Image: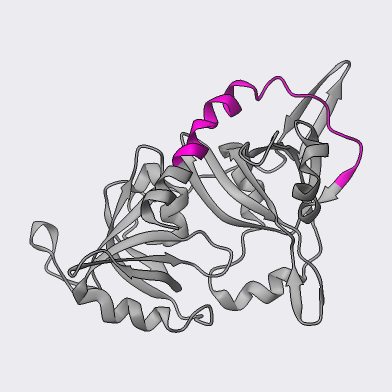
Amino acid sequence: MSRRTTIKYWMSIAVGIFCFVATAEKLPPPADEEYPAGEIMSQQLQFAGKIIKVKFNRIEHVRKIGDEAYIGTLRSFVKPKGNEYNSGQGVLIRFAQGGLGLFSKSISRPGSSDSFGEMQKPDREGVYVQIGKDAKDISVAVGDQYKKDGEDGEYKWSVDTEIPDLADKRKVSVDEAALFTDQLRGKILEIEFYIVEQLKSNSVEEYTANISSGSGHTGVMITFPVSGLAFFKEIEGKGHSSSIIRSIYAKINVTPSGLVTLEAKGRRTSGAGDEIEYRW
């Protein structure tokens, strides 16, 4: 996916947030049955507009996309045929900040070595999701509990969301950069990551790549000069096998649509304050 296409994609997601917030209090009761995440999209026409309890054991590529709004993909991994696990298409959802506490439990730990263990876990969570009306309409997670009161009902989250205080941190993970943009916007921090993918040249002097905390974690685009090419190229060559944590000093930028990008400064520093210098 090109940089321009990526930005347009996340902007289209952000447009739906207003409708999501405005209609959150006028929701129908849930359907009687529940389904694993891997079966939802193959039956989207049947479920369109309905609220379904979706079972899952993992959520992937979680990131913030706007004012107290997030996005991620629910997965329901099943036992393999042969040696390959399969989760189907998964369900792309957006959700309010109140859901982050619940979903945080189902984000795999940083480092790609944990992926296999995560896939073996049974569906241990369920969430009520209003299924999108078509392929372009993103489904919305509205809560993991439903309480009926007479003719009305209410969806709630059973786990409180606690936003960490990152104001004084000098080192953050690439996941934190993608999730807590309000606190980190415009700062230059040491960013920790594991994986480098999609390395390419923008010009003779500028390159881009996606860095992440491992399989299933959101990738964030980082821009760097030719002097950093050898560092990123070596990590990219390891594919998804790397379980070694890496770090880079970078400025955290956020587009108006909420897309996070990083501007690499270097691997090491010298000096302090206004005299600080970054080196490769």
Q: What residue occupies the far top of the structure in this picture?
A: 151
| Residue 236 in picture, x, y percent from top left | 41, 78
Image color mode: one colour
| Residue 127, image quadrant | top right
Residue 171 visible to an observer of this rendering: no
Q: Quadrant of the C terminus?
A: bottom left
Left or right: residue 134 versus residue 257 is right
Quadrant for residue 226, please give it.
bottom left
230 relative position to 146: left or right? left
Please determine whether, in this image, residue 54 is positioned above or below residue 232. Answer: above
Residue 115 within the magenta-colored segment of the rendering: no
Left or right: 31 with respect to 154? right
Number of labels in the image equals 0
The residue lying at 62 percent from left, 65 percent from top is 108
For the point 35% across and 37% down, the residue is 256
Q: Which residues are magenta?
A: 11-34
Query: In the image, 136: left or right of 219?
Result: right
13 drawn magenta: yes
Closest to the observer, 187 or 26: 26
Q: What residue do we see at 91% from left, 41% from top?
A: 33
Expressed as whole percent of the image width and height from the top left, the position of residue 80 reads: 80, 75
- Residue lying at the far left of the rendered structure: 275
- From the viewer's side, name the closer residue of 4 and 125: 4
> Quick check: 209 above or below 229?
above
Residue 41 is at least partly visible in this image: yes
Instruction: State the image coordinates of residue 46 (x, y, percent, origin top left).
Output: 83, 38
Near-viewer residue (39 or 106): 39
Quadrant for the N terminus in the image: bottom left
> Whole-percent x and y of residue 91?
69, 49
